[in-house]
Amino acid sequence: MKSIPAEPQPFKAHFGPPLVENLAQRLLAVHPAFPAVTFIADVTPQLAPLELKGRVAAIAAGLRRHLPPDYPAAIDLLLAILGPPTA
């Protein structure tokens, strides 16, 4: 029996609450002081009415508010949660 393929989701759906939660958990793993619950509560409610660029901007602004204010330290945390490079 053939399965019915799921309806394709718009690309903006990849920038929703699951991504925010994933970012929070990854940051918490490398920086235990990261306010994961606050970050999620701050960013998630903003996303639903936004299109792709707005969602990206909201997530970036939330990261800016909740990561350490020292830019190099914040960048180091973001680099620490990246996966391995792809070829």
Image (cartoon, grey):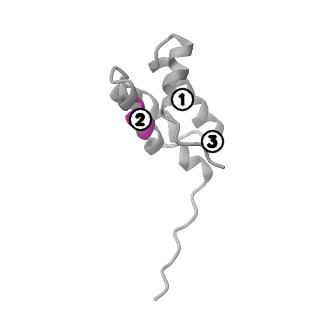
Which percent across, then down, holds residue 21? 40, 39
For marks 1 and 2, give the CA distance. Answer: 11 Å
Judged by depth in the image, the label closer to the viewer, 1 or 2, is 1
Lateral position of residue 42 relative to residue 6, left or right: left
The reply to whether dot 2 and dot 3 touch (C-beta < 8 Å) is no
Q: Amino acid at mark 3?
A: Leu
At x 54%, y 29%, the residue is 79
Residue 79's mark? 1
Q: Earlier in the sequence, mark 2 or mark 3?
A: 2
- Viewer-proximal residue among 22 and 58: 22
Label 3 crowd bin: few (<14), some (14–19), many (20+), radius 10 Å = some
Q: Does dot 1 land on a helix, a strand or a loop?
A: helix
- The magenta segment is 22-27
Residue for badge 3 = 52
Amino acid at circle 2: Arg
Label 3 residue SS: helix
For mark 2, give the secondary structure.
Answer: helix
Comes first in the chain, label 1 or label 2: 2
Asked whether residue 35 is drawn in magenta, I would say no
Question: Which residue corresponds to the image point at 56% horizontal and 14% vertical from the top-left?
Answer: 71
Q: Earlier in the sequence, mark 1 or mark 3?
A: 3
Name which residue lies at 54% across and 42% down.
84
Residue at mark 1 to residue at mark 3: CA–CA distance: 23 Å
Disc 1 residue crowd, few under 14, some 14–19, many 20+, Cα 10 Å: few
Q: Which disc is residue 26 wearing?
A: 2
Please say if 7 is above or below 67. Answer: below
Residue 52's image quarter?
A: top right
